[in-house]
Image (cartoon, rainbow, N blue to C red):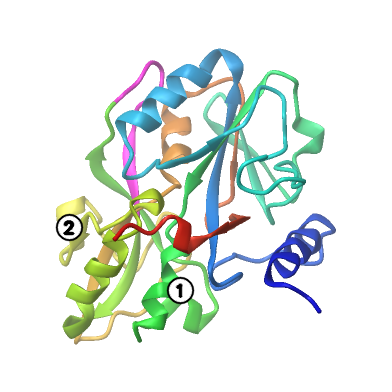
Amino acid sequence: MVTVESAVQELRHRIRSGQLQRPTAGLAPGYTQANLAIVPRDLAYDFLLFCQRNPKPCPLLEVLDIGDPEPKDLAPGADIRTDIPRYRVYRHGVLTDEVDEITPFWRDDLVSFLLGCSFTFEHPLMDAGIHMRHIDLDVNVPMYITNRPCKPAGVFHGPMVVSMRPIPQPQVVRAVQITSRFPDVHGAPVHLGDPAELGIKSISEPDFGDAVTIDPDEVPVFWACGVTPQAVMMQAKPELAITHAPGYMFISDRRESELAVL
């Protein structure tokens, strides 16, 4: 009999072997997904402090040991270098590579950070009858760079990134209530309604991901997003930084129920 846990591990195996290369929204219902940020050891304290000062966009789930690619807490036996469908490599703030594994870029001085991802609370939302437009359309969630600055820490500074989901007006309050129970994966929305208040000039032109339609009876709802470190890396310009590609997450063994608060 195949257990849910072994099914999640099999999903990571398919990613590792290159059989599954797609955004991870909608995959592994009931399990926590995570964003990834990797920096050299000499910048790790600054980035840790950045996450602590900005828990909404950068909720820390696990910090790996220096040079260790195994997330022993979230998924023992997994390999952070191979078990995400797509990665981005930045050098001095410039995106230089987008790859399906980062083993060739790995160094013994790298420190990996796994951050909570809003894909985790999408299944509770759908269980409550709130549709996720990007999942229905089988596209990536739309993400936007905002005019809201993060609190700086050392070399790290930059704007908050948000993800957007259209929610029918009568279900907005319920969506806020449900996501508020998951502070470790961004929690409640940071904004409801007019995108211009976040400095978003065109809702149909996301900075990351894919545009989705917003019906007349729907409200655009914005959550803090774990792609924020990528916007920060582009401004801080470290000599090397590695992240997941937007929408392509690490799927862990931790159940979403473990992150829920009453």
**Vertical side of 33 occupied by 40: above or below:** above
Amino acid marked by disc 1:
His
Q: Nearer the viewer, residue 130 or 139?
A: 130
For the point 35% across and 86% down, the residue is 129
Q: Which residues are magenta?
A: 152-162
Residue furthest to the right: 17
Q: Which residue is mark 1?
A: 123
Amino acid marked by disc 2:
Ala
Secondary structure found at label 2: helix
Q: Is 160 one of the magenta-colored residues?
A: yes
Q: Nearer the viewer, residue 198 or 114?
A: 114
Asked whether the residues under the numbered discs 1 and 2 touch, taking CB atoms below 8 Å apart as contact, a structural biologist would say no
Secondary structure found at label 1: helix
Q: Quadrant of residue 174?
A: bottom left
Q: Which mark is residue 225?
A: none
**Residue 216 placement (x, y as % from top left):** 20, 86
Quick check: 181 left or right of 143? left
**Vertical side of 100 occupied by 231: above or below:** above
Q: Which residue is mark 2?
A: 196
**Residue 62 placement (x, y as % from top left):** 54, 38
> What is the quadrant of the C terminus in the image?
bottom left
